[in-house]
Amino acid sequence: MRIAITTLGCKINQYDSAVIQSRLEEARHCFVPFEDGADCYIINACTVTDRADWEARQLVRKAKRLSPRSRVVVTGCYAQVSPQEVVGVPGVDFVVGLNRLDDLLRFVDQAGPLDGAGRRSIYQEVRRNFLSPMMLAFDTPIPHSTIGKRTVSNVPAQALILMNDPFVVEQAQAWAKRVLSSQKKLDASGRIERLFLEALARPPSEDELREALDFLKRQAVAYGLAPAEQHRSEALWSDLCHTILNLKEFIFLR
């Protein structure tokens, strides 16, 4: 999950934020700049002055503008001293006071990407004013009224979405990270076989294995990777995972 954390206040708050980030990185979450749009925002706010409280509320609103479907967590002494006030701020999803780091980590782990409540996608939250561009491309019904039959189409926008949508790119990266972090010491061919088994429930053919290995070599040259770096490069293996997610066999059911 992409997480953005910002800190308002003293060095103690800054230290707490560093601890939160370290623990979440251990759980394989990635951190992005606040402005880049995140799945979850953590605002560690002080309450020394009224202006500090106002700045925290402004950051909540800004987070929701940048990423409307994100989850916003407010922690720090502001959340500790005035929890009811913070709960009432529009856009706040979770308030956690001081010395409750485990509760914060548990909430983030359960939030899940994009939808934010650990739901399977079949139960995904739908907001009529913020429809998913990816789902719209794949003919999701417009939720303003009931629809008796779902439209079926096959248009270029669908292929473009699968190549460029942030959610698809993120899932390819997460898949690559999981394969790279596996305790099994697999060579490149072994990793490719594992990817095919997970995506298509079958091993790759000899031609597919050869093409995948050639793809990795070409991408390694494009990235300027030394041979020793290729086996642990997240970017390299994310590209291969992204390619597999775009296979017709993966997209269409037979």
Image (cartoon, rainbow, N blue to C red):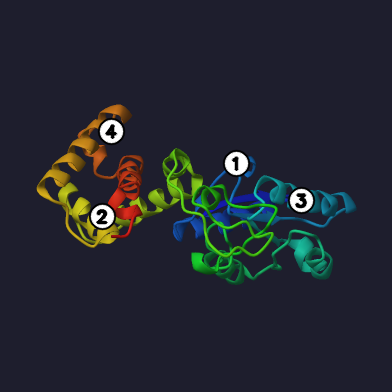
Mark 4 lies on a secondary structure that is: helix
**Relative vertical location of residue 137 with respect to residue 28 in this rendering, above or below:** above
Residue carrying label 3: 61
Q: Distance of mark 2 from mark 4, alpha carbons?
A: 17 Å
Query: From the viewer's perspective, is 184 left or right of 252?
Result: left
Q: Earlier in the sequence, mark 3 or mark 1?
A: 1
Query: From the viewer's perspective, is 179 left or right of 185?
Result: right
**Relative vertical location of residue 37 with respect to residue 23 in this rendering, above or below:** above
Of 10 and 104, nearer the camera is 104
Of 141 and 55, nearer the camera is 141
Q: Is residue 182 visible?
A: no
Q: Earlier in the sequence, mark 1 or mark 4?
A: 1
- Quadrant of image for the C terminus: bottom left
**Which numbered tag is attached to residue 219?**
4
Q: Earlier in the sequence, mark 2 or mark 4?
A: 2
Residue carrying label 1: 36
What crowding class fits label 1: few (fewer than 14 Cα within 10 Å), some (14-19), or many (20 or more)? few
Q: Residue 110: name its quadrant.
A: bottom right
Mark 1 lies on a secondary structure that is: helix
**Residue 120 horizontal/vertical position (percent):** 49, 68
- The kind of residue tagged 4 is Gln
Residue carrying label 2: 195
What crowding class fits label 3: few (fewer than 14 Cα within 10 Å), some (14-19), or many (20 or more)? some
**Relative vertical location of residue 177 with respect to residue 117 in this rendering, above or below:** above
Q: Distance of mark 3 from mark 1, alpha carbons?
A: 15 Å
**Residue at 60% across / 71% down in the picture?**
103
Q: Distance of mark 2 from mark 3, alpha carbons?
A: 40 Å
Badge nearest the viewer, 1 or 2: 2
Q: Distance of mark 3 from mark 4, alpha carbons?
A: 40 Å
Q: Is residue 173 visible?
A: yes
Mark 2 lies on a secondary structure that is: helix
